[in-house]
Image (cartoon, rainbow, N blue to C red):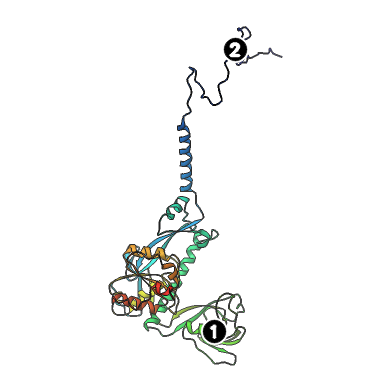
């Protein structure tokens, strides 16, 4: 073993040093420590300040970069459905109609949208949410209420585009029926429900007539007439349905189905999904991309009505609105109406047509200087636009009047 080297403890006196002098008493625990020259050492508060600033910066970075499961709805863009849009560098009419004479329309019928952030592909952060809380025109919602995390951006886009296409088709049918350019509808089977999975119907079948066992034959000319007829037939009743298939009439026998629980429907169902269009050669195309959902249906229908009838439905005024539409002209509720009214006001609209079923969401959110009128179907919307054009709105229904009923 090699030599052992001892290392003297620096805290102890050397062996050849004189005995230590008695040490001074320890200072009180509350006394400030002293430096080498006996002066008190003062702690530097700026160190704590720097630490706080660093933590604040890190918290800010996290709030500005880490996505949160929220959705922010804010006022979106508006489009005048009577006007034009830019498509592939060219100006194109937003609504183009073929098969009927059209007329130039002044003014604006403005469809409105909601800008949605927070769905897949468009994340929001805590900082975005905090900003939205202080903006009266924005609203923060749980993401699952709008677009569940399980739904991809592509799936969401496909659903919204399908809703937009369906609303456009319904708008054409409703407008042609409203103006008298069509007086009946073609009811075509697109598919069947699981309960009806018996192979009786085929895709493409056109419903011609329905005869309950022991009853009279009815040929529904519109979707509304078909719905009304089915309310008179009990679930489980045997019916004979004549369809047009491959150019020939085919008679089908089946039993009717019960409506789903909580659906609020009376009577029974055939168990089919239908494509409904006007029995007319008039058609319309829509040059609007990157916009989805069903809520522009009512304004599309108003735009078609204005284009295929003489004169100006708006009287040159700027009228905005929203609402879903069915092929028989019923206008239904939508989401984000407060944001849509705000967007319309920012675009210069002084008048807004709201679904009557949305009036509870309208009250208290009307932009300053905007007149809002409630409509429940396309005919009421046409009359409202005519009243606004004539500066005579005394007969129109307000949301205050709807709420007081």
| Quarter assignment of residue 381 | bottom left
Callout 1 environment at 10 Å: few (<14), some (14 to 19), or many (20+)? Answer: some
SS under mark 1: helix
State whether residue 21 is above or below residue 327: above
Q: Residue at x 41, y 68 (%)?
A: 362
SS under mark 2: loop
Task: Determine which residue is flagged by label 2.
Answer: 22
State whether residue 2 is above or below residue 81: above
Quadrant of the snapshot with the N terminus: top right
Q: Is residue 366 visible?
A: yes
Q: Residue at x 47, y 38 (%)?
A: 52
Depth check: give the residue in front, 237 or 200.
Answer: 237
Callout 2 environment at 10 Å: few (<14), some (14 to 19), or many (20+)? Answer: few
Q: Is residue 164 visible?
A: no
Where residue 199 sits in the image (x, y, percent)?
A: 60, 79
Where residue 267 sits in the image (x, y, percent)?
A: 57, 83
Where residue 107 sits in the image (x, y, percent)?
A: 29, 71
Depth check: give the residue in front, 273 or 109.
Answer: 109
Label total for image: 2
Quadrant of the snapshot with the C terminus: bottom left
**Mark 1 to mark 2 CA distance (whole Å):** 110 Å
Depth check: give the residue in front, 353 or 114.
Answer: 353
């Amino acid at each position: 073993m090699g030599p052992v080297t001892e290392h003297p403890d620096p805290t102890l006196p050397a062996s050849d040093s004189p005995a230590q002098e008695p040490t001074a008493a320890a200072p009180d625990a509350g006394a400030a420590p002293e430096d080498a020259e006996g002066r008190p050492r003062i702690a530097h508060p700026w160190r704590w300040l720097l630490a706080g600033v660093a933590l604040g910066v890190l918290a800010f970075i996290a709030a500005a970069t880490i996505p949160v499961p929220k959705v922010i709805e804010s006022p979106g863009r508006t489009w005048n459905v009577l006007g034009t849009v830019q498509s592939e560098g060219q100006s194109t009419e937003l609504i183009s109609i073929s098969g009927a004479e059209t007329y130039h329309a002044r003014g604006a019928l403005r469809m409105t949208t909601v800008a949605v952030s927070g769905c897949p592909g468009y994340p929001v952060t805590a900082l975005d949410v905090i900003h939205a809380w202080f903006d009266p025109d924005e609203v923060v919602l749980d993401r699952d209420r709008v677009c569940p995390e399980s739904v991809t951006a592509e799936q969401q886009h496909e659903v919204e585009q399908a809703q937009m296409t369906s609303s456009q088709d319904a708008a054409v049918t409703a407008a042609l029926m409203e103006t008298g350019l069509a007086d009946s509808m073609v009811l075509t089977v697109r598919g069947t429900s699981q309960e009806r999975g018996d192979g009786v119907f085929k895709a493409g079948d056109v419903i011609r007539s329905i005869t309950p066992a022991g009853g009279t034959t009815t040929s529904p000319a519109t979707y509304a007439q078909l719905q009304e007829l089915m309310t008179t037939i009990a679930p489980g009743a045997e019916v004979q349905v004549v369809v047009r298939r491959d150019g020939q009439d085919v008679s089908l026998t089946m039993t009717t189905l019960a409506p789903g629980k909580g659906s609020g429907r009376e009577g029974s169902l055939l168990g089919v999904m239908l494509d409904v269009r006007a029995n007319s050669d008039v058609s319309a195309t829509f040059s609007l991309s990157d916009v989805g959902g069903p809520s522009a249906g009512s304004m599309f229908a108003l735009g078609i009505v204005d284009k295929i009838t003489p004169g100006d439905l708006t009287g040159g005024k700027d009228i905005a609105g929203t609402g879903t539409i069915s092929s028989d002209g019923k206008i239904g509720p939508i989401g984000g109406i407060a944001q849509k009214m705000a967007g319309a006001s920012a675009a210069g609209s002084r008048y807004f047509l709201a679904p009557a079923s949305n009036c509870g969401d309208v009250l208290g959110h009307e932009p300053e200087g905007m007149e809002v009128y409630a409509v429940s179907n396309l005919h009421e919307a046409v009359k409202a636009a005519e009243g606004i054009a004539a500066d005579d709105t005394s007969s129109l229904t307000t949301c205050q009047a709807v709420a007081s009923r």
